[in-house]
Amino acid sequence: MPKGRRNNGEGTLRLRNDGRWEGRVVIGYDENGKAKTKNVLAKTKTECVEKLAKLKEECGRSTDRLKPEMPFGDWIDYWYQNYSKPTLRETTQSTYENRIYHHIIPSIGRIPLNKLTTNDIQQFYAKLKCGGRLRFTDVKGEGLSDRMVRACHASCRTALEKAVTEGLIRVNPAVGCKLPPKKAKEMQVLTQPEIMRFLKQAKEEGYYELFLLELTTGMRRGEILGLRWSDLNLTTGELHIQRQVVLTGKQNIISQPKTKASVRTLVLPPDMVEILEELRKNTDSEWIFPSPLDPAKPRNPSAIYNRFQLILERAQCRKVRFHDLRHTFSTMALENGMDVKTLSTMIGHISAETTLNIYSHITDNMRRQAAVRIDRGIGGTDAPMPEIEPCKPTCAATDDTVQKEFVPYTGKIRKSGTGCIYQVSERLWEGSFSPRMPDGKRKKFNIYAETRAEVEEKLPELIAQVKADIAAEKARPAEAERGT
């Protein structure tokens, strides 16, 4: 006897292999049109039908409030929770939630969805631009950036477009809004003298390997901090990039790289491999660049940024972003003849077109040089070869005379056996003591404080305690031997 078919909207029933009945009902669809479902389980078919009916009723109540006259704030919240959030990476959700719940809903969330006009949204954008900033107004001013205004527009427009497809409104009022111009962040590239000074200062402060690897590969900050020793083959020089460290709020998250193209394998130069091999001998952590606070964890991205800015200042270099080290590598690679496709693969771009768009100032000159070479070879002309113009420095600290006179900042010189003191960030100082243990190996002990004076006060106590522990440990074998 054929099984009875259930009508559309009634859900589905099936007997599982484990003997239980499962009921499933469609509760909505994602951005790609794929059905989103919920299910119930029961021992008998009758019980499963009852549970499925209750589930349908609950789901029905959740969608009853979706009406044209509902507040726009309720709709954009519903859109985010049900359509947008499930498709976002955890690290991206916080940026969406910030602009939706801190800016969009407080400003225009009370307006009924079917009453929201283009003028309402346009005034909201103007308000953001003039006085929408909620924090750091003393440093960055009261208005939000053009980029943030465009991001708020993207959320409003997408949410309202979904309302149109759901039949809640007829037209999208965000479509006709005028937006601030889209501006790419200015790219800055360190000059060769700046790179030399920067690396000298980084070596003095114990960050040489990290920043040299960055300038050698052009990895993103999160990618280089997410490297484990298991990702590096010291024999072949292959380095596998397969995770990143991202700061969300005050917590570090280990996640997949930015895109599929970001999961890649690089082959390091032999000199870089030798430097990392030497670094491997002096660390017991699984991370190539472990946190000084907890070697079982990777370094904090914010701490690395703060140290990076401090090294730039001490090396008499321009103030640039960490991401500009990636631009520096890419620019040097192109200037030295690397083809765009190879570079695109190395730095993890989705396509070579992305690389061409970002580094058009270099690739345009490369095309002109190629045209001149063809003209010389085929036409036999002596046309002058155009030079590739790198990003121009903006301060006098890049002069070669500074490079010749530069001496790395070394800080206060301490006597042997009194430990070392470092400034980790603006509000964090580290005191360290690395004695030789009874087994012949050195072990590092650390203390931290907000000021150098506090570390100077606590460090002698740490050293005295560690020395006492070592002496006690050395005394145990002798006591055991006398006891026998």
Image (tube, rainbow, N blue to C red):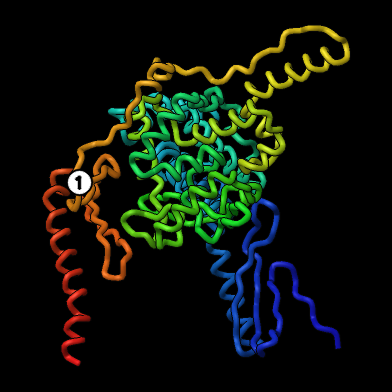
In the rendered image, the residue lying farthest to the bottom is 484
x, y percent for residue 46: 64, 87
Is 130 situated left or right of 219 in this image?
left
Residue drawn 24% across the image and 36% down it? 411
Q: Position of residue 378 (x, y in %)?
A: 88, 14
- The answer to which of 410 and 110 lies nearer the viewer is 410
Q: Name the residue type under label 1.
A: Glu
Secondary structure, mark 1, is loop
**What is the crowding at mark 1: few (fewer than 14 residues within 10 Å), some, or many (at least 20)?**
some
Residue at (44, 29) in percent of width and height: 196
The answer to whether one can see residue 135 in this image is yes
- Pick the quarter of the image with the C terminus: bottom left
Give residue 181's position: percent from left, percent from top: 55, 22
Residue at the spot 64% in from the left edge and 42% down from the top edge: 346
**In which image quadrant can residue 128 be found?**
top left
Does 380 sit left or right of 166 as displayed? right
Please give the residue where the numbered disc 1 appears in the rendered image.
Answer: 450
In the depicted structure, whether residue 183 falls above or below residue 291: above
